[in-house]
Each structure stands twice: as structure tokens, then as C-alpha cells.
Amino acid sequence: MPGTASDPLAEALDAARSAREQLATGLANERQMMASEVHDSLAQGLTYMRMRMSLLRDAIRQGDEGRALKYWGDVDSSLTDAHRRLRELITYFRTRMDPRGLVHALGEMSESFLDRTGVALEFANRVPDLELPVGREVQVFHIVQEALGNVCKHANARCARLSLERREAGYEIVVEDDGIGMLDDAAAGERGESGHYGIAIMRERARRLGGELVLQSAPGAGTRVRLYFPAVQPQSEDTL
């Protein structure tokens, strides 16, 4: 038949066109992910520092040494935090997500946690076959990484626990520790005078997953961070 010889060529052209479209989509998603990460890691901190610099200028003009030193300390702390986040961002875009998946990445992080931090971490995984799109895995991984980072930096804990479970139509990840806990304003997740705004970023990442993040803590009673997100990404949410 006359059309038969052209069918393989047409199929090859369609396949090439589809591959180009997938590549273009992947590049667009990659750029959006980079923009989101830069916003979370740097832009908010720079905005905070700009506001503090304005207050510092006013304090210097008024000769108020006490206020000037305070605002200088705020800027210095925020610069240190921004530098740390920039290093993490560079490392992330060099190494990418573990190609073996989120569960493997969490397992490896848990295995080395005691040696790196001095805090014993138990990893209770009840979803060994968990598979998510890479964009969602990245968001979950960064939330867990931030929560565990807070454990080793602020909790003064001896033990911590990371659990992953299936809950109804979604998944639940919990990070809890036996540390000193947090004050109410810090647990609320708003950036305070200390210059830390990681909890607010964690909540924004949870929103992108179509889920929610709940933090429970009290002075002397440890901290519990619970992330819940649906198994299927809501159409109204951005996965990046």
C-alpha cells in the first residue's frame, strides 16, 4: 500500500516531536524549580536585610547605639543564614535528588545522622514502595531536611524519630525529638528577631504539595513536625 512505507517515517517524526516537547517541558520545569528555590533560600532573606538596614540607618542618624547594634546583629545573623542556604542550594543543584528515590535518600540521611550530629535518629518507614514525581520528592526531602536540621541546631535533643506512613488518601511524615522545645512565636513559623524563617518555608513547600504542615512544641517538651500531603497532586497546586 502506498501509505505503508511512510508510516515508520511518520512515527519517527512524531516520536522526535514528542521528545522535543518533553525536553522543553522539562527545561521549563527545571527553571521554575530553580526560581522557587532561589526565592525560598535567598529573596526572603535579602528583603529582611534591606528592611533592617533602613532601621539601622535611622538608629545611626539618631545616635542610638543600642538599637544600631541590635539591627547590625540582625543583619549579620541573616547574612550568615543566607550564606548557608546558598551553599545548600548550590549543593542541591549539583547533586540533584537521589536517583534511587525519596525513601532511599531519607534512609541514607538517617543512617549518617548520629555520626554527623550526635543525635540518635530512628527511621520508621511503613511505605517502602513510595514513588512520587521528582518535583514532589524534592519538596518532601527539603521539608524533612529542614526539620532534622532544626533538631541538630536548636533542639539540644538526644534522640529523634522520623516516620513515614500512609494516611487515608495521602502520606504522613513526622519528625519528633526529645529536645528543649520551642517558644510559641517560634513554633508559629513567622520570622522572628533571631533571623530564622525555615518553618515558614517548610509550610510553603507543604502548600505546593497540596498538603499541610503542623508543628507542635512547648518549652522543655520536645518538638513534633507533621507533614501530610495527598498521594495525587491537586490540579490547583504547583508541584514545583
Image: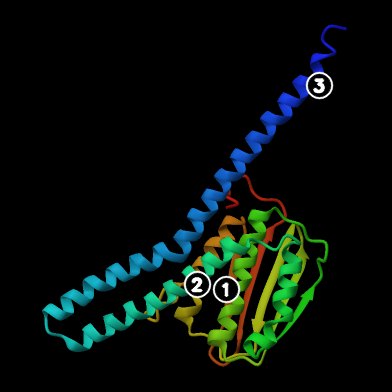
Q: Closer to the N terminus: mark 1 or mark 3?
A: 3
Helix, strand or loop at mark 1: helix
Please indicate, yes or no, whether residue 48 appears anywhere in the rendered image. yes
* Residue that extends furthest to the top in the rendered view of this protein: 2
**Label 2: which residue?**
198
Establish if 88 lies above or below 96.
Answer: below
Specify which label sits upstream in the sequence, 2 or 1. Answer: 1
Three-letter amino acid code at the position of disc 3: Pro
Residue position marked by numbered label 3 in the rendering: 8
Residue 151 in the image: state x and y as whole percent: 59, 83
Tell me the amino acid under the disc marked 1: Glu
Q: Quadrant of residue 44?
A: bottom left
Give the percent coordinates (x, y) of residue 229: 66, 60
Q: Nearer the viewer, mark 3 or mark 2?
A: 3
Q: Tell me, yes or no, whether the two marked residues, 2 and 1, touch with CB atoms within 8 Å.
A: yes
Quarter holding the N terminus is: top right
